[in-house]
Image (spheres, rainbow, N blue to C red):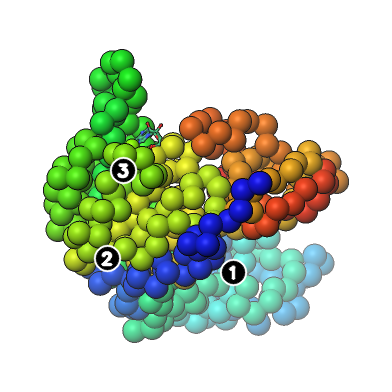
Amino acid sequence: MAKSDKNSLSYEEALAKVLAYGEPLEAEEVHFMDALGRVLAEDALSDIDVSPFDNSAMDGFAIIAKDLEKASADYPVSLEVKELIPAGGVPQITVEPGSCARIMTGAAMPEGADTVIKIEQTSAFSGGGNVGETIEISAPIELGANVRYAGEEVKAGEVVLPKGEVVDVAAIGLLAATGNTTVKVHRRPVVGIVSTGSELVEPHEKPGKGQIRNSNSYANASQAVDSGARTIIYPIVEDSYEATVEAFKQASEECDIIVTSGGVSVGDFDFVKPALESLGTLEFAKVNMRPGNPQTMGRIGNAFFFGLPGNPSSCYVGFEAFLRPLILKMLGHKDLKRPVVHARLEKGMSKRQARKYFLRGNVSKDAQGNWVARLPYSQSSALLTAAHYGNAFVILPEGEAKIEAGQDVECWLLRIDEI
Ligand code: AMP
Ligand code: MG
């Protein structure tokens, strides 16, 4: 029975070490349309009241509410239409008792008027209501109805979106409305991707005997982009000490984060650890998790270094478990975790290793609205299919255990829109 290695950190210990290295990066000024998904590094202020003036929320008539106090079906009140105010128009008259202005949605309220009555609630709904004509209204109306006041969204000089806020699609609208055509956000980290392995060829090549295609570089680069980083994909590094050192040195000069895959086992051609130790510092090399026990963290110069295992799903899990939270932290996010739910595991299983398991599963709600977790695809660390069709990590905690069908398991929701 496999025992956990004394040199292995728990996942939680390892993640804490990773996150201790990452601080939000410096601010950069970007066009507000390039800020989507990013975190504000400074408060965004409004240069005007939004909206800039009191305006109508309806197509109707700007009136004085008091005029309609006694209106009823038997004794409708007549008002004379003095002006037509389209959106963008500037009111010219002052509404006086007994009069009104025809007004369109978004148009500025005229002086004197305090309320807007919808056209549907006036005789003009069935025709008329032009300037010079009168309209009839047969019910009172609440003072201020259908008026949107200046500065309701935000006032001139006030903070519309504070530092630390994530710019979502609605925030883009707020930035536009408040004249924030550029904003300060945290810089995106540059993630350098280095795949090691003399057996690797690039995706456009047909592998020869003993060769396989490099898939990790592209899956990891996509995970990095998905997390908000910029990426540099470096050429494949052959399994030699010199080539590995050379590649890491170059990446450390160009990147904030270096992510490697492969070469971290105890094979005769695994040079990642020695290369890292010769150029920088090694913090840890093993984490008590599965898949992917050999996770290697360190630093080269100013670059954070993380060596992922070569097996494609170990590599995928390691990125999600360590590098995504780090990238989010460097981008200034506070929420570094995926949403977590607890689900009933559909089928029991024996966990024969003490490590924490990150299984690639599918989480959904059953007819009663309870979360259920299934593991329909092979969990082999060499295969990525379960990661693609899965929408969650099904987490089994450290320690040997027999997990019965129906037992509660923690699940990280990776793709909420697939649930
Ligand atoms: P290693 O950690 O270098 O011993 O690699 C473990 C396994 O992952 C081997 O079967 C490798 O061929 C495979 N592998 C390593 N790097 C990659 C990669 N970039 N893309 C796909 N498979 C890889
Ligand atoms: Mg290798």
Amino acid marked by disc 1? Asn
Q: Residue at x 50, y 31 (%)?
A: 383
The residue identified by callout 3 is 270
Q: Residue at x 29, y 35 (%)?
A: 197
User: Where in the figure is residue 410, as x and y percent of width and height?
Assistant: 68, 55
In front: 288, or 249?
288
Could you tell which of marks 3 and 2 lies nearer the N-terminus? Answer: 3
Q: Quadrant of ligand 2?
A: top left
Name the one closer to the observer, 117 or 17.
17
Quadrant hosting residue 345: top right
Q: Secondary structure at mark 1?
A: loop
Q: Residue tagged by mark 1?
A: 146
Relative height, residue 161 to residue 348 (above, below)? below
The 10 Å Cα crowd at callout 3, few under 14, some 14 to 19, many 20 or more, is: some
Residue 138 appears anywhere in the view: yes
Q: Amino acid at mark 3?
A: Asp
- What residue would you read off at disc 2? 281
Of tags 1 and 2, the one toward the viewer is 2
Q: Quadrant of residue 77?
A: bottom right
What's the distance in space between the residues labelled 1 and 3, CA to CA?
Answer: 72 Å
Q: Earlier in the sequence, mark 1 or mark 3?
A: 1
Measuring from the top left, give residue 406's x and y in whole percent: 83, 46
Up-down relation of residue 415 to residue 208 (above or below): below
